[in-house]
Image (cartoon, helix red, strand yellow):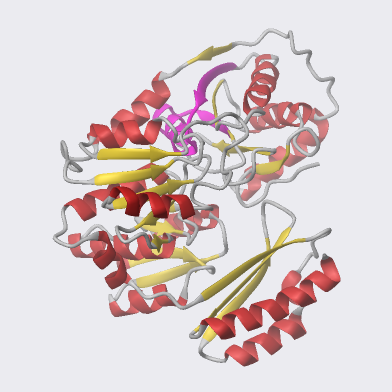
Amino acid sequence: MLKFGTDGVRGEFGTELTTSYVAALARAAAKVLQCKLVVIGRDTRESGSVLEAAIARSLSSLGIEVHLMGVAPTPAIAFAAASSDVVSLAITASHNPYSDNGVKIFGRGGRKLTDEQESQIELEIASEVNREELPASSKSLATSHPEYLERYCATLVAGMPENVLACLHIALDCANGAMSEVASAVLVALGAKVSVIHSSPNGKNINHQCGATNPGELREFVKKIKADLGVAFDGDGDRLIAIDDSGAIVDGDHLIAISAQDMKRNGTLRNNKVAVTVMTNIGFHQAMKQSEIEVVTTPVGDRSVLIAIQENDLSLGGEQSGHIIYRDLATTGDGLLAAIRLSALIANSSQAFTQIASKAMTSFPQVLINIRVAKLGENIAQIFANEIAAAEKILADNGRLLVRSSGTEPVVRVMVEARENEIAVSVATTLVAAITARLG
């Protein structure tokens, strides 16, 4: 049975993630969270509507009212929970391929669940999963409610000055996902000229050779149309990767550094701190030190960042992958909100995006390799302690490494940073060979 990972539950549709499982998960969550009404949204995967129907029937069997957003970005689904004080479910597998799907749960107030709530739901699922699955013809209390998404878009537009982006030409890669219609509409409403690629979802092309995990085509597109910047979203729209006007990739570390420095200047960086994960580049830490900004480091996952933001009363945090959380404006990572704030900063600057990004920080060369394994070890760092110690000796004080198991799929992630790319590649390759030999 699937367990909660770093961001909800996720697995291959039809094998790991079945209609009976999500039905049991929905009932369990509704009981633990004491729901009377649940809002459901989904990304563009072909399995999304099937899972949506199964969840709606399951919740209806408990007498729970269900409001359907249809296709909507995850941050819009979280916004629905926050603005209406209800529980919401996002049916999505984020950046995974279309064959996977998953469920993210937002509690009242739009916040992700606590460890205790997730544990209670997992215990409840054990009894719910044995219930007979409802037939597809079972009556559902679900009704369509597009106004949730409309309010999300209207709030983003209302939060900025009129025509604030009128001087910008923005290129978008919507990953054939949940931002395919929403992002361009909002940016145009803010005055921008917008050119879009990968905004024609067919159920199978979500994240396929496009979006935040594969922005190569967007880089060329930005240069071709001479855009001021490019923005690539992932499938569910809770993160972004940017492209500067020269076609260079600007990752989450750079984007958070740009925001932190800007917020410090305008007095909105609460407690003069920013929260990031252990994956954040050494160059970010050096840049924050130079800017006299304190850094709170967390485990991987935007949920961990959110916890650090709450515990330290911060206004900004995020991940290298492009999850950026503006806590005073949203309860979770929001790729479109981050894109708007970045675009506004560029629009109000006398400098091009290339100059802004290059001045914010300088990254150490970083090698990140994902190894799909047959079975994950319980403690990867302990299993390969000798190999990791040898690698750290080579890097000494001029780099760092991280070996960890993914929280969402059977993958071991190896990250190595060094002052010279050749050293980073060599150390990473040696570690990958050792892990593959034993676990591959």
Residue 108, percent from left and from top = 49, 34
The span shown in magenta is 65-90
In this rendering, is residue 132 above or below 284? above
What residue is drawn where x is 81% and y is 41%? 1
Residue 66 included in the magenta stretch of the image: yes
Residue 213 included in the magenta stretch of the image: no
In this image, 104 relative to 261: left or right? Answer: right
From the viewer's side, name the closer residue of 128 and 1.
Answer: 1
Quadrant of image for the C terminus: bottom right
Residue 320, percent from left and from top = 48, 62
Can residue 198 be spotted in the picture?
Answer: yes
In this rendering, is residue 158 above or below 287? above
What residue is drawn where x is 16% and y is 45%? 167
Residue 254, percent from left and from top = 37, 65
From the viewer's side, name the closer residue of 210 and 73.
Answer: 210
From the viewer's side, name the closer residue of 425 and 317.
Answer: 425
